[in-house]
């Protein structure tokens, strides 16, 4: 393609992003979420209207939750596809900063296109403009700098010729993957330029699969061969690299048990004999016992977050080696790990080939059997039908109603810990947990994004009343778009998870449950009525039996279906789990706090 095309900068951006393809030959960006304002409606709005047959524009109700939907879409797609989000300047842009941080922590692609101030500065200060008294180049969009992998401000149309390829290179690179922000000055969006026609030729972005360095591989092979009790910690990178089958074959070939982080859960089917369950703070007794004794820990695609490592108190074998197989050098070197920087799929194959017929001692299957024997009764139907249900019993009801294609998802509150311990994922991709940022408000929009990514899957969103109140407006979007998924809303009347943490560190119950918060009129929220007002089908059930009946009814819904159930805010699964470093005050008037401080100091000494 030769010659030039005279287009506005906004038109050029939209045309370019619509022809960027993934390795399957389909558009990498599957649509753009937009809330228009004076910073993007005239430029990008007009451009998107003109390209409405090439790239679909979705209208949301909140900039942050539009991003959450886009992030969940990319996560469920294994980073093979993504979405873009555009906002006006000012509050529309800063609403997206939290979501950008979420995408950054989870290493997920997201293209952010906030409007920006006038590059020519003629009408300064414009409505919603942040003015830095000491730096004339600063705008509100500079808030994105620490929470994106690539930031650029488009102050001339021709800057797109370099900025856009850099943006896609970042979003499609396994090691550098994360959110991108192109702050788009609103006057520049409307400016025309003679762009090279070749710039708009379709381009395929191939997923780079880096092989292992020979020296690193040899060192890791020697360490594994010398180990007597190795364990594999499966992280989210196993899913992103489409390496779940490779992990299974590796574990089976070399008889090494696997434990799963929140992001790695469902890498192996729950009933695979080498899957010893969830690890760490919200982990199982079986997984944590193996990790305590392990003399070699092989992390595959994990960031080794504190919840995974028990705040680095879990791997207690004094002579243990830590190996990190990770595509990102930053993660491969954490905590003095022996690095094996490579793609998880390719790396596991190369490592297995180098190990040959090596096989570790078979792990003790009795550990896993004992774990399920201890926790399975917690998910049974309650003997007292009139008792307030526990979260564990709710999970049991949802599990019984689920099938092989079910995706259960959550992000914050009580449910992440309980689901990590109790949920039995039968296949890869059946467990979608945003626990890198654990962002309250991710759930409703995230469930919508998952269903958009995989319409054939049965999506069940587990959300507490606290998270639902944080961000629920995209329920109306899902109803408008006819996107069916099920929300199980557990109402424990406050922040039950943090209330238990407060009590667990010696604190008095204060400002978490609504009854312990300052109020004049007791809170009484009809969540079923609220969901119905947004266009969802909804029902408030009063028992586990009624919940099970509602979950059957939900299967026939043509849009979002919300089931509300009151739950007991205090019980949690007593078995499993590991210490989490949450600092307890050194000085307090409360005896309970002083006692917890002693226990805390003992744990610190035990590291």
Image (spheres, rainbow, N blue to C red):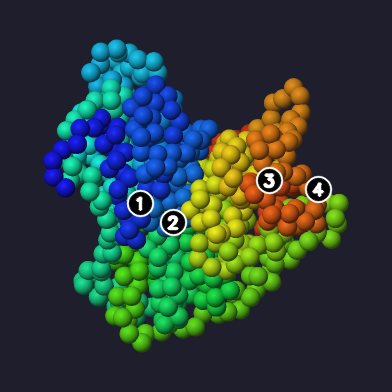
Cα–Cα gap, marks 3 and 1:
33 Å
Q: Nearer the viewer, residue 390 or 506?
A: 390
Q: Secondary structure at mark 1?
A: loop
Q: Which residue is mark 2?
A: 77
Say above or below: 356 vs 20.
below
Say above or below: 162 vs 243.
above
Residue shown at the point (35%, 15%) measured from the top left? 126
Can residue 322 be seen here? no
Cα–Cα gap, marks 1 and 2:
13 Å
Residue shown at the point (58%, 64%) measured from the top left? 405
Cα–Cα gap, marks 3 and 2:
25 Å
Q: Which residue is mark 4?
A: 542
Q: Which residue is mark 3?
A: 562
Cα–Cα gap, marks 4 and 2:
36 Å
Where's residue 96, x and y in %?
43, 34
Q: Secondary structure at mark 3?
A: strand
Can residue 585 be seen here? yes
Cα–Cα gap, marks 3 and 4:
14 Å
Residue shown at the point (56%, 48%) measured from the top left? 447
Q: Earlier in the sequence, mark 3 or mark 1?
A: 1
């Amino acid at each position: 393609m030769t010659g030039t095309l005279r287009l506005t900068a906004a038109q050029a951006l939209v045309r370019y992003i619509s022809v960027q393809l993934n390795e399957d030959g389909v558009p990498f960006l599957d649509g753009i979420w937009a809330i228009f304002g004076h910073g993007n409606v005239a430029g990008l709005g007009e451009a998107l209207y003109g390209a409405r047959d090439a790239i679909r524009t979705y209208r949301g109700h909140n900039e942050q939750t539009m991003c959450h939907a886009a992030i969940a879409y990319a996560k469920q797609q294994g980073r093979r596809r993504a979405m873009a989000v555009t906002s006006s300047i000012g509050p529309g842009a800063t609403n997206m900063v939290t979501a950008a941080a979420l995408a950054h922590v989870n290493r997920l692609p997201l293209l952010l296109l906030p409007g920006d101030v006038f590059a020519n500065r003629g009408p300064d200060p414009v409505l919603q403009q942040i003015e830095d008294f000491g730096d004339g180049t600063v705008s509100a969009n500079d808030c994105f700098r620490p929470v994106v992998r690539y930031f650029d401000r488009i102050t001339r149309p021709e800057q797109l010729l370099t900025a856009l390829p850099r943006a896609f290179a970042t979003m499609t690179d396994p090691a550098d993957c994360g959110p991108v922000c192109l702050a788009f000055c609103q006057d520049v969006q409307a400016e025309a330029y003679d762009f090279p026609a070749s710039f708009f030729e379709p381009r395929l972005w191939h997923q780079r699969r880096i092989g292992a360095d020979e020296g690193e591989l040899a060192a890791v092979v020697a360490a594994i061969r010398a180990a007597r009790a190795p364990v594999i910690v499966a992280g989210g990178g196993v899913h992103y690299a489409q390496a779940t089958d490779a992990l299974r074959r590796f574990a089976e070939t070399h008889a090494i048990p696997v434990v799963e982080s929140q992001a790695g859960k469902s890498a192996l089917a729950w009933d695979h004999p080498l899957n010893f369950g969830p690890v760490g703070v919200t982990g199982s007794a079986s997984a944590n016992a193996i990790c305590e004794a392990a003399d070699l820990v092989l992390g595959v695609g994990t960031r080794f977050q504190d919840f995974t490592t028990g705040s680095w108190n879990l791997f207690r074998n004094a002579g243990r080696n830590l190996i990190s197989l990770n595509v990102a050098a930053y993660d491969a070197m954490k905590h003095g790990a022996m690095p094996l920087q490579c793609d998880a799929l390719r790396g596991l194959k190369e490592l297995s080939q180098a190990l040959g017929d090596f096989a570790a001692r078979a792990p003790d299957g009795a550990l896993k059997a004992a774990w399920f024997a201890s926790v399975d009764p917690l998910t049974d139907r309650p003997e007292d039908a009139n008792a307030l249900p526990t979260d564990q019993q709710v999970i049991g009801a949802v599990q019984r109603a689920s099938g092989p294609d079910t995706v259960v998802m959550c992000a914050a509150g009580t449910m992440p810990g309980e689901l990590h311990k109790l949920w039995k994922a039968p296949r890869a991709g059946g467990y979608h947990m945003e626990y890198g940022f654990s962002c309250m408000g991710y759930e409703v929009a995230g469930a919508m994004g998952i269903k958009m990514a995989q319409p054939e899957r049965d999506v069940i969103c587990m959300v507490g009343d606290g998270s639902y109140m944080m961000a629920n407006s995209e329920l109306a979007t899902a109803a408008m778009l006819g996107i069916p998924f099920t929300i199980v809303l557990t109402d424990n009347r406050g922040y039950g998870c943090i209330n238990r943490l407060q009590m667990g560190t010696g604190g008095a119950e204060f400002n978490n449950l609504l009854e312990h918060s300052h109020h004049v009129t007791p809170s009484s929220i009809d969540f079923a009525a609220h969901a119905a007002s947004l266009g969802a089908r909804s029902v408030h059930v009063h028992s586990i039996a009624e919940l099970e009946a509602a979950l059957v009814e939900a299967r026939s819904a043509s849009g979002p279906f919300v089931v509300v159930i009151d739950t007991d805010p205090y019980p949690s699964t007593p078995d499993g789990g590991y210490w989490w470093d949450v600092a307890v005050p050194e000085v307090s008037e409360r005896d309970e706090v002083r006692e917890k401080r002693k226990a805390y100091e003992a744990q610190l000494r035990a590291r």
